[in-house]
Structure formats: C-alpha cells, structure tokens
Image (tube, grey):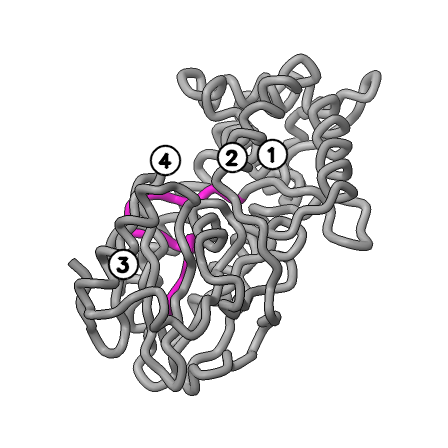
Amino acid sequence: MAEWNNDIAKLTIPTPFAVGDVNLYLVRGERLTLIDAGPKTEEAWEVLHSELESLNLSIADIDQVILTHHHPDHVGLLDYFPEDMEIFGHPLNERWLNRTDEFLQQNNDFYTKVLKEFGMSGQYDTMALMLSRELRFFCSRALTGVLTEGDTPTGLNGWRVIETPGHAQSHIGLFRERDGAYIGGDHLLAHISPNPLMEPPLPGEDERPKSLLQYNESLDKINRLPISVIYAGHGIDFSNVSELIEQRKKSQHERAMRVKGWLQGEKLTLFEICKRLFPKVYKRELPLTASETVGQLDYLLSLGEISEYKEDGVSFYTAVK
C-alpha cells in the first residue's frame, strides 16, 4: 500500500516483463506529479487505481506526468490517461511514444544492417518478433513539453532534471537539492545491473549511440551529486550510491576482460560472443543479450583492448594485447 514519505509516494505496479514490478512515484509540489506510468495492461491500470485510492486520490487528481524514459513498462498506461493530461519528458521520448511510419522503417533498416554486421542475419525474424511484441505494451501519445539537463519541471520547484543516457537515450532523473532525493528511473538499481539498450542512430546522426559508454559516463555524473537516497524504477530505495556504482563498474569490467580472453588468438563475431556470454538465455532474450554484448565490445574497443574488422559485411573481433 502506498504511503507518503517526504512528499514522495511509491506506487508499485505489475508488469508482464521479466524485470517484475515497476515503481511509479507521486510527488507533491505546486502540481501533483506522477513520475512514469507503467505498462499498458488492464492489471496495471487496476493496480494503479488501487494504489491511488490508498492515498485517497484518483487519476483526476494528477496534474501532470513526467517520464524518466520511453520503455514500455514506464509509459504504456499513458493510453489510459485523459487526453488532456500533460506529459513531459526528454525530447528523445517522442519518436517512441508517437511512432511514425518513417521512424518504424528507419528502425527496421537499422536492425537489418546491424544484425548482418553482428553475424546474426539468420536471427532477424526472431529479433523482429520479440521487438514487435513489446510494442503492444507501448502507448501512442505525444509529449506536451520537453525536459532537458538542468530544467526545473513546472510545479516542482526545488527539483532539477539530470540527463542520464545509457539504459535509454531518453533517460532522465530528478534531483531535489534540499535533501538529496533522486528519482532515478532505471539508471541505477539495487538488485540488478540495468542493460544499456542498443538503439538506432539519433536524429541527424548516422552511427548508433554507444550505450554502455554513455551509461558509464552517466554513472560518474550522478556519483558527483550529493544524493542521499535513490528512488529506483524497480526494486528498493537505496542510499549506498558510490559503493553500488563501484560494484557495477567493476563487474562490467570483469565481464569485458572475460570477453577479451576469448579473443586472444581467436576471431569471433558478436553473435558467437553473445552465445558464450548467455548460453542459456540468448535465444529467449535476444534483444537484451545482443545489447549487452555490443556494449562489452564497445567498451573494449574504447580501451584499445580489441580490434574490429569486416569480412563480407560481418564484423569480427580479436584481442590486440
């Protein structure tokens, strides 16, 4: 049951995804603000109503919604909200929330290209099916307004926006100066390491973002903030921010070095590495495991630990040290 704590109330909503429940947050300010919306399911909608009722509130009492990022477990229920509900988020939410045929075609072309480079052309139908299944939990809404680095959202004086790309290109957090409270979405979680997901090139660019490298930079960024507690998108609230960041980066580096070890004297495609990293789950979680694998390779390439070359359009990787 939801309850208020320092003008913040956590609403725990079920999802159909392996990550489990998602946390939404109500924030009392000049405007009653809901942070994130949950997935587009009847169960999520019913539980949201129940959580609000425990606070003697209803959907009609909410003045605005702010999105931490565009993933379906955080935005889908927007389709159930009144048409005049004001919705704010980073501008890179828009292409996912208000999908055009042009964007969907660009997305399809992107995956066709990168799956060939990854040695995964034969997995295209599987990948496309998995990605299309997620679309049913998305919404089709447009942002009312955008939030970027340093902005103070309307009606939330004392809070400011922190851009934290990595897990998603649209990802932001909200930091309250007076007490160090941070509503962080999925950027840093206590129980699991969020996957920096692969996305198509940003508008006006040709190359895909290097999501894991961005994610690490965003970890360093929030580590410089005087955060007292993180209200996370999944799981428990926590305060050991620096310690957890150190653990996450250490584990990631160790995994990358394990990948480098496989590439000593051997050349492998991304798909071959993916199957070694995730032998039991790569088939049923292909978008996630491919994203994790490309992140490790981007990281190793940035350190100069491995090299990449192409044969017939397929990328191969080998260690250089």
Which of the marked residues, 4 or 2, is nearer the chain's N terminus?
Answer: 4
Task: Kindly report the distance in space between the C-alpha atoms of the residues bearing marks 4 and 3.
Answer: 17 Å
Q: Main secondary structure of the magenta part?
A: loop
Task: Kindly report the distance in space between the C-alpha atoms of the residues bearing marks 2 and 1.
Answer: 21 Å
Amino acid at pointer 4: Pro
Amino acid at pointer 3: Leu
Task: Kindly report the distance in space between the C-alpha atoms of the residues bearing marks 1 and 4.
Answer: 26 Å
Which of the marked residues, 1 or 4, is nearer the chain's N terminus?
Answer: 4
Q: Secondary structure at mark 4?
A: loop
Q: Secondary structure at mark 2?
A: helix
Q: Dot 4 corresponds to which residue?
A: 16
Where residue 98 appears, x then y in whole percent? 64, 52
Q: Dot 2 corresponds to which residue?
A: 134
Where residue 90 appears, x then y in whole percent? 59, 64
Q: Dot 1 corresponds to which residue?
A: 294
Q: Dot 3 corresponds to which residue?
A: 11
Where residue 255 appears, x then y in whole percent? 46, 34
Residue 187 in magenta stretch: yes
For this rendering, which residue is in front, 59 or 298? 59
For this rendering, which residue is in front, 276 or 301? 276
Other residues around mark 1 within 10 Å, as few (<14) / some (14–19) / many (≥20): many
Q: Secondary structure at mark 1?
A: helix
Residue at the image position 77 percent from the left and 54 percent from the top: 203
Quarter placement of the N terminus: bottom left
Task: Kindly report the distance in space between the C-alpha atoms of the residues bearing marks 4 and 2.
Answer: 10 Å
Amino acid at pointer 1: Val
Q: Are marks 3 and 2 in contact (CB under 8 Å)?
A: no
Residue at the image position 31 percent from the left and 58 percent from the top: 243
Which of the marked residues, 1 or 3, is nearer the chain's N terminus?
Answer: 3
Which stretch appears magenta?
182-196
